[in-house]
Amino acid sequence: MTNRTREQLLPLVESYFNDHLRRVRGASPHTVRAYGHALRLFFIFLASRVRRSISTLGLDDILVENVLAFLDDIEGTRGNRAVTRNCRLAAIHGFVEHLLRHDVYHAEQYRRILAVRAKRAPIRAIEYLEPEHVRVLLEQPDRRTPAGQRDYALLLFLFNTGARISEALGMTADDMHLAPPRHVRIRGKGSKERICPLWRETASALSLVISAGRTAGPVFRSALGGPLSRDGAAYLLSKYVDSAARKLPALRRRRITPHVLRHSCAVALLQAGVDLTVIRDYLGHATVATTSRYIETNVEMKREALKAFWQRAGLARRTGGRWRPAPSLVAFLSSL
């Protein structure tokens, strides 16, 4: 390995995150952190494999053999599932594509890495709450207190809009129009914006939070006045799920995260007969294929489809109306 290839690696890593991911792609902080974690694990593994320090790694070390060994280590040694393996591979692919744009000399070794395919992984059923379960959850915050008003507004907002938790926590008062027509401007992945309508109840709940002197910066704030974090929001939801489980014991066996409320919004829209393309735009999905997963996971819609299929097949028992005796028969029996 030449000193030149060693010296080039670090600048390309920096330009990948600072220039490509953040500026060109407009990736969210969550995506940047996830990709950074994946590449950090890869470089730690790579340094151990070649028996050198990370600072001495170079472009010559970015080989398909090392990538495959890293992926095997993820599943074999670390015990991760295929889904995690595929996420790590996606991060490596993104970085290697960046290398290919800036380092044609190693194009062949990069091409071999990009040819590594994701592993088929079992698709887990999407977790969601039925509307009646969400209603019980929304009853838990104590809306007589400022903290309870904030928590109620946040939970209702997530269910109303199907926003990602990062999108909700980044909302400001300027993004919201709480007078008719009530709506909110949501900034999603890749700096894409979408408009979502708000229920009157959601607008009223948000107005209480905003009118409490929180007009600047994020709407949802912690008890100390700083922005509410993702972990903080997850903790609040977990607390209210535990409280709701006293009335709905089945919730104790489920892992309810803020993203489950996004799924719950999508399924509720689907059950209401809203077209998939509308739900796609409502949630900010890139393709309708992502949205169609909610059809696969909704048991009630499958049950209705099976019922319609049974009736269409002509196998359902045909029953007439309720039997009523003819007047002449009633008269005859009365005369006996």
Image (cartoon, rainbow, N blue to C red):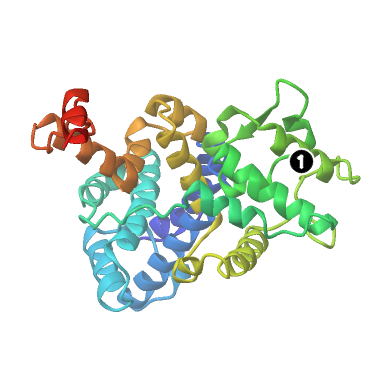
**Left or right relative to 244: residue 69:** left
The residue that mark 1 highlights is: 206
154 shown above or below 61: above
Which element carries disc 1, helix, strand or loop?
Answer: helix
Quarter occupied by the N terminus = bottom left
**Left or right relative to 303: residue 154:** right
User: What x and y, as percent, mark residue 204?
Assistant: 77, 37
User: What x and y, as percent, mark residue 275?
Assistant: 39, 25
**Left or right relative to 268: residue 110:** left
Residue at 68% x, 44% y: name it. 170
The residue positioned farthest toward the front in the image shown: 336
What's the residue type where badge 1 is placed? Leu
The quadrant in which residue 258 appears is bottom right
Would residue 259 be visible to someone looking at this image? Answer: no
The residue positioned farthest toward the right in the image shown: 213
Please name whichever residue, 305 or 220, is drawn nearer the observer in this view of the structure: 305
56 shown above or below 2: below
User: What x and y, as percent, mark residue 259?
Assistant: 51, 52
Residue at 51% x, 30% y: name it. 282
**Circle count:** 1
Quarter occupied by the C terminus = top left
Report crowding for label 1: few under 14, some 14 to 19, many 20 or more residues within 10 A (C-alpha): many
Would residue 322 be visible to someone looking at this image? Answer: yes
Please name whichever residue, 128 or 223, is drawn nearer the observer in this view of the structure: 128
46 shown above or below 148: below
User: What x and y, as percent, mark residue 137?
Assistant: 60, 57
Please name whichever residue, 162 or 230, is drawn nearer the observer in this view of the structure: 162
Residue at 43% x, 60% y: name it. 39
